[in-house]
Amino acid sequence: MKLQFKLALYNALTKLAIILFTGALILFSLERITFHHIGLRLLQKKAELISHLSSKEISQILIQEKSFIDYNILPEEYIDIEPLKTLYNNEKEVTFTTELRTIDKKTETYRILKSGFNYTGRGYSLEIGETINGIDELKSTIKGFTLLMLLIALSLTLLIDLIFTRYLLRPFYQIIDRKLVKVNDPMNFDYEKVSTSTQDFKMLDDSISSLMIKITNLFTLEKQFIANVSHELLTPISIISSRLENILQQEGLSEENENKIFASLKSLDRLKSIIKSLLLISQIENNQFNKNARVNIADMVKEINEEFEDRLEDKKVTIINQVKNSFIMPANLSLMYTLLYNVINNAIKYNHKHGTITISDTLKEDTYILEITDTGIGIDQKEIEKAFNRFEKLDTGEKESYGLGLAIVKSITAFHNIKVQIASKKNMGTTFKLIFEGQA
Amino acid sequence: MNILIVEDEKSLVLEVYEFLSKEGFTVENAHTKRSAEEKILVNNYDFILLDLGLPDGDGFDLLRTLKNIKNREDAVIILTARGSVDDRISGLEQGADDYLAKPFSLNELLARIHAITRRKHKLESNEIAIKGFKINIQNRTIYYNDDRINLTKKEFEIFNYLVLNKKRVISRTNLTEHVWGDILEINSDSNFVDVHVKNLRKKLAQFAPIDWFETVRSIGYRINI
């Protein structure tokens, strides 16, 4: 969940809790207060009643030993006096209850004072009730009001919180987006500060920037190092190989020595290939190539296939070229050539004798996909990831592999924003997918 | 023919010097841009082998100086470890005749020198004869007496290179690099060269015995005449 929503949710929840709590508190204390007031009123009534006991009407009723119920036209209050057989023990004792009573065929909830008194030598029980329907109505009104308030407050806070946190967090997301997500090469890092008044974000921005400066410095150093080393190594190799070639010209050289010299030349060649590959990768990563050629992939595939004729013949491998779309993209000609050359070369190199290579393509809207499928030895799923690392030699039984072919492929595809997918099954073959998106 | 080597690596100069001298060239050296400039202004050369990274300047400047002198036809071959495509293109655009990336094979250098010589001087000896086989480099054809032998482009290249470097063992690697160019991550020991050589031999042997076309075990080939 996004931080923005979390904050809004947290705010909403705390507000909900506060309103619910105060609502409950109000309802609870409302009951307590009204009950207290009713109790006081009932006590007053009781006192009034007892002080009026001498009045003629009541005493008459009491003497007739009948119970007495008195109520108003609206049965909001009632008084119930019943004669007891014995004397009422504790005249001072008063209890309050909340019970249902049916008076004049209407059942309502009453707050009831229960007590008793003795009059003219007899005991009477006394109930004075007051309806609390009014309070219940008030309570439900308050409940409704609270609920409404709750809903309004909740939606308002959610909205405001969302807008505010959005505003508050915008620099944060900008930093994430501009400084972290979109940076795929520290060389092209955008050092312009994201404008914010939040100090924490400023700190984050500054920390990322200073980290990037460090990384860029290391990167540049590494690239320079590789370029320098490669360059400085090529001249001595040139000297050694020339010297060895001159020795070969000498007459009277034994066959054994001749073989040794050729073996040395071969090792030098291997060294040369490795250095040149590293140099190429470093040059691509340093953006030392332009993209000012318009490359037709189909034509290039055809050209490379012709180039491979001899190798195909040697391995008895057949290429089935099903490329049918004409896809033209701005690219570096020699790099694209090297890329396709390496991919097809791998398909031949790791193929079985009498195997086939199928090259096909699809063009949908602005996405062009080139697929190179071989019937070769395949790669393990978990080795695919590793395959693109420099000097990563897979267990392919290929002696002459330097483990740089796919590293070159990786840097060229990265340079041209081409996506690469490899699907492979051991001993079934490999499918190499190059995905060109929106580059025509 | 006289050749000027402009190169600051003295050991490399020594080797190139030795090789080209044995081939019958008159060779001179210059280790700095300044001394090279002096030599270029004073003498005409058939070939200038030019290193781009000189201690006191860029080889390109030297190339420009040379091209600004009128009536000079010195052929320039750039030798460099820079090896970037841009360098290659700008070198050729500025009037260099060829471009060899270090490390290069001396045989390859010789082949380039021969190719430029033929191009420049439109040599009458566009035909090389070898044991009755006549190679016409211009038309890229090969005849035995009056019978034309049909070779593929690659077979012709291989034969031509071996004949040019006759009496020398040419390794498969060297041959591959010459015929297929300098493609990276090439399978240097692949025997696909052998396929071509096998076919080439078959085609030649139909006309005459070719025991002079030797296979040097585990190394490469030699035309031993």
Image (cartoon, helix red, strand yellow):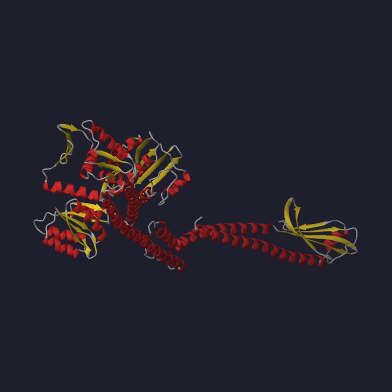
Q: Is residue A8 visible?
A: yes
Q: Residue furthest front?
A: A252
User: In this image, A417 relative to B106: left or right?
Assistant: right
Q: Nearer the viewer, residue B209 or A356?
A: B209
Q: Nearer the viewer, residue A282 or A25?
A: A282
Q: Is residue A189 visible?
A: no
Query: Which image quadrant for residue B8?
Result: bottom left
User: In this image, B136 relative to A96: left or right?
Assistant: left
Q: Position of residue B128 (x, y in %)?
A: 16, 41
The answer to whether residue A389 is above or below residue A306 is below
Q: Residue furthest left?
A: B71
Query: Which image quadrant for residue A127?
Result: bottom right
The answer to whether residue B133 is above or below residue A149 is above
Q: Position of residue B120 (x, y in %)?
A: 13, 48
Query: Which image quadrant for residue A434?
Result: top left
Q: Position of residue B146 (x, y in %)?
A: 14, 32
Q: Nearer the viewer, residue A217 or A428?
A: A428
Q: Nearer the viewer, residue B166 or B174?
A: B166
Q: Position of residue A201 (x, y in %)?
A: 45, 65
User: In this image, B48 relative to B196: left or right?
Assistant: left
Residue at image point 26% right, 43% down: B179
